[in-house]
Amino acid sequence: MEEIRFKTRLREEMVDLTVQVQEAVRKSGVEDGLVHLISPHTTGALTINEKVDPHLKDDILTWFHEMVPEGTKYGHTGGNAWAHIKASIVGADLTVAVTKGKLVLGKWQGIMFCEFDGPRSRMVICRFVRAA
Ligand code: ZN
């Protein structure tokens, strides 16, 4: 098991963790298998999407902002219900295949941590499964 620790800088942002996850895979020594990534947070989530165009990250965050607007209609006493709702929509974990020690991702794909209530200290837990 490995932990990737990082700090988000903005209230809402998508942080590309592909390089850090690949490094965790290298350290694990897994050549063929799976890496299971877990976000142990209630207002941060994990997804795979295009890593190249920064405008796309803004488009995704803007879409979520419009779908789940901030406001006073929520009952959650923490005052950040919208961030929890967005995190539930995106999801708290991901599984990525590993072949020949490399993450199996498309050329344009990256592993993104979605911050919905930053800035905060965050972590992603990496658990490895070796192919039999
Ligand atoms: Zn809350």
Image (cartoon, rainbow, N blue to C red):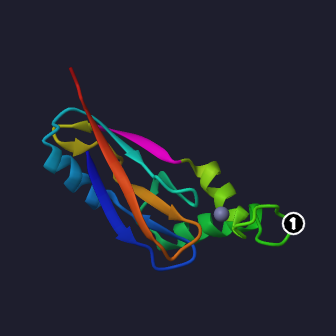
131 vs 5, left or right, is left
Residue 74 vs 46, above or below: the answer is below
Q: Farthest residue in the front direction?
A: 77
* Residue 72, quarter of picture: bottom right
35 vs 116, left or right, is left
Observer-nearest of 3 and 130: 3
Residue 107 x/y as whole percent? 34, 52
Amino acid type, label 1: Lys
Q: Farthest residue in the bottom direction?
A: 9
Name the residue at 27% across, 60% down.
20
**Chief secondary structure of the magenta span?**
strand
Which image quarter has ligand 1? bottom right
Residue 64 x/y as whole percent? 68, 62
Observer-nearest of 10 and 56: 10
Q: Does the residue labelled 1 lie within 8 Å of ligand 1?
A: no
Range shown magenta? 92-97
Q: Looking at the figure, which quarter contains the N terminus?
A: top left
SS for dot 1: loop
Observer-nearest of 21 and 42: 42
Answer few, some or many: residues within 10 Å of disc 1's Cα (few below 14, many 20 plus, some between 14 and 19). Answer: few
Q: For residue 57: magenta? A: no
Residue position for label 1: 73
Name the residue at 82% across, 61% down.
75
Q: Is residue 108 visible?
A: no
* Residue 6, quarter of picture: bottom left
Name the residue at 59% across, 70% down.
117
Residue 3 x/y as whole percent? 29, 55
Q: For residue 93: magenta? A: yes
